[in-house]
């Protein structure tokens, strides 16, 4: 297809992530993952019929960043009861987070009770280019294979697999779909590993020039997985909203860096201050009724590289994290 004839001079997300996909599949027995074929595509089950685990989630998070991110598990600041968490870093945070990790492609098939719906994230998005965001990023990838990560609780239908492959301009047997239910070990890990991506997404929504973001690092506590979807969704969101910390390095004037540090944290939202599951219930399950500015880390540092000055905004809320991690819905 002509849209892949002129590769972008920046790193290829598909090329960087290909070895990560290969190792994930090769190590599936060790990682407790399931591998099967649907419509010709390789489908990796990381929590539906196979248990997966924290290491699987860590690797999937790095895959989801297109090979441009590093994810580690270890101690992070937070409630004493929950001392471990996720740290994520990228030397190219805009491309890794917005160009790959962001769950920006809405994928669905069918209707009614048997309908399948998921948001597609991962390096394959830069091949499909189904979102206006890629025009703004001015990024175009080229490859004969693609990989996606989806927070799904069921296998995708073959018809959807064919649609994804066609949009990417590849054969279906060159497509890999990694499925991570939110309440699974791997799902919990890879969602919390989006702490940096959440900051980049809000930064973009605030109108800060993404080209001025040079580097970034973030961390957030790792919630206990399991339970029902609402419990898992609440905990993973709260880990970032009330327990997440991000440090961004940007170019440009000090006053704009300072303004970003004040506007970026979740505390700048009108909905800040309650566990996410409560906010979601109050909105009667309507995501669009929730202030979009809520979805950001609790605490932010922005360093203005031109002057060397740093600006801080927001604060951790360990009591809310503790409350969320113990609540079961």
Image (cartoon, helix red, strand yellow):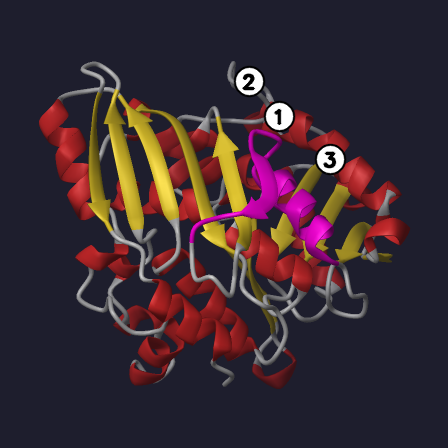
Q: Are marks 1 and 3 in contact (CB under 8 Å)?
A: no
- Residue located 28% across and 60% down the image: 294
Asked whether, in this view, residue 28 is left or right of residue 304, the answer is: right
Which residue is identified by label 3? 20
Residue 44 sits in which quadrant? bottom right
In this rendering, does residue 207 appear at all? no
- How many marks the image carries: the answer is 3
Q: Are marks 3 and 2 in contact (CB under 8 Å)?
A: no
Magenta range = 53-77
Structural crowding at the residue carrying mark 3, measured as other residues with C-alpha within 10 Å and reported as few (<14), some (14–19) or many (≥20): some
Which residue is identified by label 1? 142
For mark 3, give the secondary structure. Answer: helix
Residue 304 placement (x, y as % from top left): 22, 23
Question: Which mark identifies residue 6?
Answer: 2
Kindly report the distance in space between the C-alpha atoms of the residues bearing marks 3 and 2.
24 Å
Q: Earlier in the sequence, mark 1 or mark 3?
A: 3
Q: In the image, is residue 164 part of the stretch drawn in magenta? A: no
Kindly report the distance in space between the C-alpha atoms of the residues bearing marks 2 and 1.
8 Å
Kindly report the distance in space between the C-alpha atoms of the residues bearing marks 1 and 3.
17 Å
Q: Earlier in the sequence, mark 3 or mark 2?
A: 2
Q: Quadrant of the N terminus?
A: top right
In this rendering, does residue 286 appear at all? yes
Asked whether, in this view, residue 135 is left or right of residue 268, the answer is: right
In front: 222, or 198?
Answer: 222
- Residue located 59% across and 61% down the image: 188
In front: 264, or 115?
Answer: 264
Q: In the image, is residue 61 part of the stretch drawn in magenta? A: yes
For mark 2, give the secondary structure. Answer: loop
- Residue located 29% across and 43% down the image: 300
Asked whether, in this view, residue 266 is left or right of residue 180, the answer is: left
For mark 1, give the secondary structure. Answer: loop
């Amino acid at each position: 297809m002509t849209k892949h004839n002129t590769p972008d001079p920046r790193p290829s997300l598909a090329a960087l992530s290909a070895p990560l996909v290969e190792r994930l599949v090769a190590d599936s027995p060790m990682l407790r993952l399931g591998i099967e074929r649907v419509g010709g595509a390789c489908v990796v089950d990381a929590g539906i019929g196979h248990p997966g685990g924290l290491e699987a989630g860590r690797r999937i998070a790095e895959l989801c960043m297109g090979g441009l991110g590093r994810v580690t598990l270890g101690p992070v600041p937070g409630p004493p009861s929950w001392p471990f968490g996720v740290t994520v870093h990228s030397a190219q945070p805009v491309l890794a987070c917005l160009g790959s990790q962001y769950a920006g492609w809405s994928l669905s098939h069918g209707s009614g009770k048997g309908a399948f719906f998921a948001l597609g994230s991962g390096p394959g998005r830069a091949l499909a280019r189904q979102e206006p965001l890629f025009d703004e990023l001015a990024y175009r990838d080229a490859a004969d294979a693609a990989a996606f990560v989806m927070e799904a609780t069921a296998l995708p239908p073959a018809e959807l697999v064919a649609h994804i492959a066609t949009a990417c301009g590849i054969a279906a047997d060159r497509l890999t779909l990694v499925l991570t239910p939110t309440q699974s070990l791997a799902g919990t890990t890879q969602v919390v590993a989006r702490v940096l991506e959440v900051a980049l997404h809000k930064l973009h929504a605030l109108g800060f020039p993404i080209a001025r973001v040079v580097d970034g690092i973030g961390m957030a506590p790792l919630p206990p997985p399991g339970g029902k979807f609402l419990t898992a969704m609440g905990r993973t969101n709260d880990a970032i909203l009330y327990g997440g910390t991000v440090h961004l390095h940007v170019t440009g004037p000090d006053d704009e860096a300072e303004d970003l540090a004040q506007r970026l944290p979740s505390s700048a939202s009108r909905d800040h201050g309650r566990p996410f599951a409560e906010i979601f219930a109050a909105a009667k399950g309507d995501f669009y009724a929730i202030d979009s500015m809520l979805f950001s880390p609790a605490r932010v540092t922005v360093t203005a590289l031109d002057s060397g000055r740093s600006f801080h905004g927001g604060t951790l809320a360990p009591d809310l994290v503790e409350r969320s991690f113990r609540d079961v819905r």
